[in-house]
Image (spheres, rainbow, N blue to C red):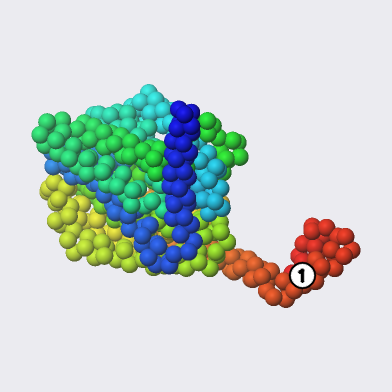
Amino acid sequence: MADSASAAVRSSFKSEVDSDELRRRRETERLGTDPIVPLVLRLSLPAMTGLLVSSLYVFVDRVFVGRYVGEVGLAAMNVAIPFSTLVFSFSILVGRGCSVIYSIALGRKDYAEARRIFSGGVFLHMIVSLFIMVFCQVFLNRLLNVFGAEPQSIDATRRYVSIVLLGTPFAMLTMHNHLIRAEGASTYSMMTQVTGALLNVILDWVFMAHFRWGIGGAAFATVIAQAVSVIMVMWFFMKRSVVRFRVADMIFSARMLWLVLINGFTPFIFNAAATLNWTIQNHMIKRHAEKSGFSVTTAMAAFGIVMSLRMLIMTPILGLSMGMQPLVGYNYGSGQYARMRNIFKFSVLTAFLLMLIPYGVLEIFSYPVVRFFGAENDTLVLGVYTLRRFMLLMPLGGIAAMFSHFFQGTGKPVEALVVTGVRQVVLAFPFLIILPYFLGYDGIVFATPIAEVGGAIFGVFVILREFRRLRVKENEMDLLKSPMIESEHRLTCSADDESGSTAGDCMEEVADVV
């Protein structure tokens, strides 16, 4: 009797689990059937909101540091950004790479493969994060000089970075948000980010305004908030996902490792290039700021404010592209190419409109916005001057970011790499190095906007080429489905049945007709 009751309980539990997984699978399959506009908004709005709130990690830290530490603190935060982008580069190498093949696996309804992708991603993130944390702590002083630290703020930078590096595993594991979003659970993905960001704001106030821990308080707040976000992410994959975490699946096959790295390589290069871009920018500021009549610390602080605002404004575009990417990947995997193109076109138009609003606000209210960071005197004047010019071509720059995400979503890392490389490397680096020698400080300000516009123009040509290729593929598929081909197929197969030909011979003849 006991064995019978135990078996009944196990059977009931298994039925509940199977029913829940079936429900989640049906929700995922809606990515290929629901109307495009509400579907893009349903996935993108939570992603935008979550990332917008999540970007407060940097933004709020800058505000509190500016108000409670001052100009030296803002300059220190500007030098610390390359460390953050370096960690983000490696975390997105694994996170985005897993997300692409995870979306395609879901589109093919291969849930066993999806489970292996997730479990292996956790393992890779842990290994990479531990290596980065140890490496950066050991060579911290050398890295500070490489990233452009200047004498007045190097002690504050060292304190902030040494603490933030302790949270590297948490920062990386939060990248599994991409996989949550790939399942269509974008609302929960948003909640993991919102919870961490709001906790970061609260802890910033407690540690800096109340306990007076200075720039170290901002670092501790960030690490604790990231840890809470990771707990929420891992709970999803333990309780609500269409897949379940399994220790046995944590070891990648060589093929899967290659797919993750090749699909994550483009966003990795994008962010690694951003790290190098920021480093070059810091060194150019050190070289040319005093020639323009400002101290290096003031220029670093002003640029730090502007770059924080840029990151905040670009966040909705990143959220939109992240909401678009699983839709593009799913519909590409299921062969719905026309639907995939329409999703991309709507997303690009939305991105352009989203950039116009903050552009106008920053141009009109630049003084109060910069003053909000606690900027005064020369920092305020230079901050406003830099902000108005740096954001001049921002609407077009936002569109450029969409192209690489499209190619990442369709599993075409080479095209994504080319589009990103032209914008982030081929154009940005030469402009950033050469223009300051002719325009001084203005050359640093205008280098990035010019490179982004050039990258957007190049991206248009590449994306149109891909659309033409997909239309040819669609025409071939339509021809195979046409009544003439079906009739030819039936007649051929019927005749072959009488003569004893195989099914393979039949299909070869159909291919010849096409």
Quadrant showing the C terminus: bottom right
Residue receiving disc 1: 490
Q: Nearer the viewer, residue 344 or 18?
A: 18
Residue 99's place in the image compared with 334, above or below, is above
Residue 416 visible in the snapshot: no
Drawn side of residue 212 relative to residue 465, left or right: left
Q: Residue at 86% across / 60% down in the picture?
A: 501
Instruction: Estimate the x, y position of residue 316 in percent, counting from the top left.
Output: 32, 56
Residue 107's place in the image compared with 148, above or below, is below
The quadrant in which residue 66 appears is: top left
Drawn side of residue 335 relative to residue 60, left or right: right
Residue, far top: 138
Label 1's element? helix
Instruction: Estimate the x, y position of residue 328 in percent, counting from the top left.
Output: 49, 59
Drawn side of residue 144 relative to residue 126, left or right: left
Drawn side of residue 30 relative to residue 259, left or right: left
Instruction: Estimate the x, y position of residue 15 in percent, counting from the top left.
Output: 47, 43
